[in-house]
Image (cartoon, helix red, strand yellow):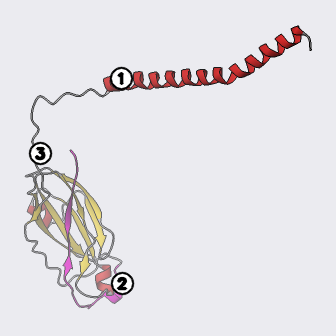
Amino acid sequence: MSRRTRRHAARHGARRAAAPRRLLLGALAAAGAIVLGVLAGGGTFALWTAAAPAAAAVTLQSGSATLTATPLDLSAIGLYPGRIVYAATTVRNTGTTPLALTIDPVTSTAAATPFSTAVAVTVGNTSSVADCATGRVPATIATTVGAAGSDLQLTLAPGASQLVCVGVGLPHNAPAAAAGAAASVLTITISGTQVRL
């Protein structure tokens, strides 16, 4: 092997030996750049999350949702198809949160009969007891025993009250099997659900 070939082989061997060292130095430089980038990013993140205490103290207090209703004096004895009897009750929001009113499913104390399933219940806002007694209620929600509850489209603010008219009757198309059936006690429940005004 000539001298020139030996020199070339020595340089080539030196380059081969230096290659892993260069790779290692390159990897360390990249790792150092990543560490510096993370540290710099962390400083920027801290600027975005700066906080200061509120100037005034905040007092938290729980609220309450409570409804009351005056007794409903409603006797539906002697109903026949087409006859509806009415009575008024005052519903008041005695809690501290606004309440949206709904009528829950009407229940009966007796097992379902042709009479109890035919009975129709209406609930609506009224302006006076006299208007309610004569059935002059501008808009009502109609339901039957066991039917799903309904939204009364009425929201009561805390301390507010509303006169509500309840009607119980038999529709004109009540089945003949409903005639002469035993009476039962109906439970009509008005509920309130908290809402935001």
Q: Position of residue 38 (x, y in %)?
A: 44, 26
Q: Earlier in the sequence, mark 1 or mark 2?
A: 1
Depth-wise, is mark 3 or mark 1 nearer the camera? 1
Q: Amino acid at mark 1?
A: Gly
Q: For residue 32, which numbered disc appears in the image?
A: none
Q: Residues within 10 Å of mark 1 (few under 14, many from 20)?
A: few
> Residue 61 vs residue 120: left or right?
left
Residue at image point 19% right, 27% down: 52
Q: Amino acid at mark 3?
A: Leu
Q: For residue 175, which numbered disc appears in the image?
A: 2
Q: Position of residue 57 (x, y in %)?
A: 9, 35
Count how many numbered circles sit on residues in the image: 3
> Residue 59 vs residue 118: left or right?
left
Q: Which residue position is annotated with label 3? A: 60
Q: Which residue position is annotated with label 1? A: 43
Q: Position of residue 141 (x, y in %)?
A: 27, 63
Please determine whether, in this image, residue 11 is positioned above or below residue 96. Answer: above
> Residue 30 vs residue 182: left or right?
right
* Helix, strand or loop under label 3: loop
Q: Amino acid at mark 2?
A: Pro
Please determine whether, in this image, residue 63 is positioned above or below residue 50. Answer: below
Depth-wise, is mark 3 or mark 2 nearer the camera? 3
Q: Earlier in the sequence, mark 3 or mark 1?
A: 1
Give the extent of the magenta segment: 174-197
Q: CA distance from mark 3 to mark 2?
A: 57 Å
Quadrant of the rendering where the C terminus is positioned: top left
The reply to whether the C-beta atoms of the residues labelled 3 and 1 are less than 8 Å apart is no
The answer to if 42 sits in the magenta stretch is no
Q: Residues within 10 Å of mark 3 (few under 14, many from 20)?
A: few
